[in-house]
Image (cartoon, rainbow, N blue to C red):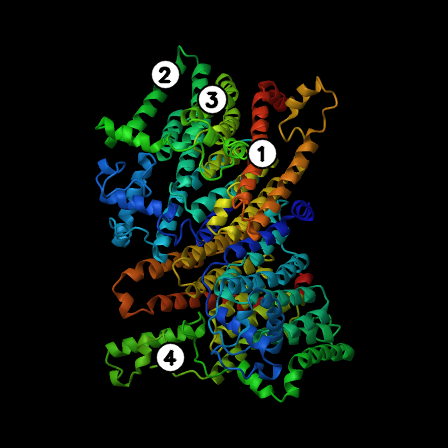
Amino acid sequence: MAGFGIVTGADNWFSALALGVTLLKCLLIPTYHSTDFEVHRNWLAITHSLPISQWYYEATSEWTLDYPPFFAWFEYVLSHVAKYFDPEMLNVHNLNYSSSRTLLFQRFSVIFTDVLFVYAVHECCKCIDGKKAGKELTEKPKFILSVLLLWNFGLLIVDHIHFQYNGFLFGLMLLSIARLFQKRHMEGAFLFAVLLHFKHIYLYVAPAYGVYLLRSYCFTANKPDGSIRWNSFNFIRVISLGLVVFLVSALSLGPFLALNQLPQVFSRLFPFKRGLCHAYWAPNFWALYNALDKVLSVIGLKWKLLDPGKIPKASMTSGLVQQFQHTVLPSVTPLATLICTLIAILPSIFCLWFKPQGARGFLRCLILCALSSFMFGWHVHEKAILLAILPMSLLSVGKAGDASIFLILTTTGHYSLFPLLFTAPELPIKILLMLLFTIYSISSLKTLFRKEKPLFNWMETFYLLGLGPLEVCCEFVFPFTSWKLKYPFIPLLLTSVYCAVGITYAWFKLYVSVLTDPPVGKTKKQ
Amino acid sequence: MEKWYLMTVVVLIGLTVRWTVSLNSYSGAGKPPMFGDYEAQRHWQEITFNLPIKQWYFNSSDNNLQYWGLDYPPLTAYHSLLCAYVAKFINPDWIALHTSRGYESETHKLFMRTTVLVADLLIYIPAVVLYCGYLKEISTKKKIANALCILLYPGLILIDYGHFQNTYNSVSLGFALWGILGVSCDWDLLGSLAFCLAINYKQMELYHSLPFFCFLLGKCFQKGLKGKGFVLLIKLACTVVASFTLCWLPFFTEREQSLQVLRRLFPVDRGLFEDKVANIWCSFSVILKIKDILPHHIQLIISFFFTFLSLLPACIKLLLQPSPKGFRFTLVSCALSFFLFSFQVHEKSILLVSLPVCLVLNEIPFMSTWFLLVSTFSMLPLLLKDELLVPSVVTVVAFFVACATSFSIFEKTSEEELQLKSFSSSVRKYLPRFTFLPRIIQCLFFISVITMVLLTSITATLDPPQKLPDLFSVLVCFVSCLNFLFFWVYFNIIIMWDSKDARNQKKTN
């Protein structure tokens, strides 16, 4: 009866949306899963059957534990439920073990932990005041936002088909953002610190958190022109913030410090031995750089400017090998990417410091940090684009300009996830879900901002429509051509370069809008 | 009109659910020597592609009718042939004569599933979308919600995409829906053409034929048999005869051909019922084994007699007062009568009742949702056999949530919403204190749902006692049958007490 009550209550749309997507996730159980499934099974086994001192040393499987300690503890907790499903999956030596009960347990563990994500979305919807619009439920910003987050295409396919635990991690992040919006800064900081010890990829957005908390929480007042009032510095706040972060870190890393294993843990967390780009180039700046290098080398060979003997062989099959050697342009080192990333992040940080615009400004800075590190980072995964897409959803229902950037970023970012699912039975699913999300997001935001200028100019429309023919070429036409054997990497290359253009454009546009936006104080006066 | 993007979203959700269900197992997967309905469909592709049309329905050394012989009308056979041409293009092994028996592979499964999706996308889904768009007197939002609920109806999805029925229900029901749509919009010729196609795709569509006949004849009467009505009648007759002739043309060359097809379509020498089905005969045989006691032809006569009697009142009413609304309700009650009382009924035939019930979802949301839940539940033994428990539970819950949120069904249980107002007021003439009907119905709903949940969990988790291996499936059938009988009474009451005055009153209000 209680269930009926929830479903039929007056304000029931949120639970219906959440329940609906949960059921869809359950339907995705029998779909293909990647090696990440085995990775997480192995971690369950490691944490369950070995003492802590061996967690970061165990190397029976090639998928060693390379997430921070909280995630290891998370797997430890899960493993105590897993043993009731199938104890065999908890054996470290049972490599590639996947019984039907293991599958059920692992899939349901992702679905179940997503409860945190649902709660976080609920909190976000409460604190985001989007544009005021019509009375119709489907035109309310809150409704649109919760669909954009709960039914996010990327999260669905990465977590529930490809298999990963991003749902609850993003839940933590959205929850901490929501707390900052609600002015509960300490809670936000605490949640983010916890998140960092779950998965260290969130370090990319840490600068935004640090600077925002320092500027808008530790300094309690501004001068009338918006610049900083140095004497308003609040020592107690700084110390309590520091204490929270320190305590969380101590809880996480303390045991390993006591065991004298910190260097080993860090060497697992930050493997710099991998190449600049993943096997499939994430659609970022380096994808464009590699493509340019490729074009130049082809031109060079044609015009006899390059010596064919000197060209490294690997570059001819680029996209399939981990190491990509540049032929014309200089090779890129990890240090170079780090410097590029820092330079890309800096302006947004400055903006956050000198032009504080409250929590909204922080959110923009966070997105820019995530996007910039995606653009210039070392060995970036295409999945990392979700780090920018999900927070960007919060902005999209507020302003028409942001909505337009969001739509370009999301559509191209999601399309760039397509190569993750390459098996035939999943082809219809990814196309249908992508269409579902894209049509919904574009149409609903267009309806929301119908009184303002159109969201896209002709160039952007043309670019987005181009994704359709691209998909047809890559997955329906190309496999039947004779090039399939000779140049198998072409679809991946085309996809990543095409998407890189869109994402770079969105990054640039967002940067311009952040830098040119007048500070809050001035807009109020006008 | 701005909200039509939501309709696209709804259709995409329906398609996604369909495809994800199709990733599960199908009937007879890896179970030689007979396999299941999936193999039947593949076998028909093999037969229709390799043999000349004259041999399709005849037993021969190349066509063993005992092994999934073709027993559906010509359109099904043509559809198989069409699929076979595509199969030939992809992989000729799939339809090689003799050697392809029991062929199973991941790619082949993908191909078969795709044929279902394509048929669904071309015939059933457009019909549903158009039907919901055509609904009058409700807002766009409600139309879209209605489409969502119809597209999410779990019974059809599970049978077509999970179990894999050998005649695609989405095609036959889709054609029938086009027929209903046409007839209700006064495009009578197109409607009857579509319905003829439905019958020629699957003979079970005859369950719907009487309401069509009565409705169209009633329309002719209304227009006056001496003037326009007569012209319409002639036109309709010509359409029906022409479409049947066209479908059966290759079999009309010899008398024996047509007779053989008919013999294959109506296997009267099979028993009163097969397996466990939630109709009267199967449920009654728990008490008395009619199937074994009575001679065969008497069974046939009894079942015919009962069926005829049970659908007579509703049909006469429709004939005298033809209206689109009455037509939809008569479709429900007639199909239900056939399902409950007729000869040789399959458990999957309940889908033929579900389709018209889907169409009245927006008129009586509470009862329709309840019926659709029961109808899916009645196929539980079949779904469990195909290892479709998880998708069944998930889709049923999804459907229930969709109905509950889009129609807020629990707030719509008053006499008026249940369309029982005129009935109870006429009862009140004799029994003045007759006001508790809605409450009884609510109680029955909760009892029914709880029984279904309990039985599902028992069947899924426990092994039946050794002495009674069929205990759970018989229980499922018995419970569903009781529910269906109740629904049959309810729908007949609605039809009989639906008067023009009541409708006029509503309009003036």
Estimate how packed mark 1 is, as few (under 14), some (14 to 19) or many (20 or more) residues with alpha carbons within 10 Å. Answer: some
Q: Please state which of the two labelled residues, at mark 4 or mark 1, is closer to the viewer.
A: 1
> Callout 1: residue from which chain?
B
Labels 1 and 2 within one chain: yes
Kind of residue sitting beneath label 4: Phe
* Nearer-the-camera pick, A484 or A301: A484
Tell me what residue is drawn at x 40 percent, y 47 percent. B117
Give me the disc on residue B482: 1
The residue identified by callout 3 is: B305
Kind of residue sitting beneath label 1: Leu
From the top left corner, tell me how far across and down residue B176 is, in percent.
Answer: 42, 33
Q: How far is the residue under mark 2 from the one under mark 3?
A: 34 Å
Q: Please state which of the two labelled residues, at mark 2 or mark 4, is closer to the viewer.
A: 2
Whether pointer 1 and pointer 3 mark residues with C-beta atoms closer than 8 Å, the reply is no
Q: How far is the residue under mark 1 from the one under mark 2?
A: 45 Å
Whether pointer 1 and pointer 2 mark residues with C-beta atoms closer than 8 Å, the reply is no
Q: How far is the residue under mark 4 from the one under mark 1?
A: 70 Å
Give me the disc on residue A324: 4
From the top left corner, tell me how far across and down residue A141 is, in percent.
Answer: 61, 53
Kind of residue sitting beneath label 3: Phe
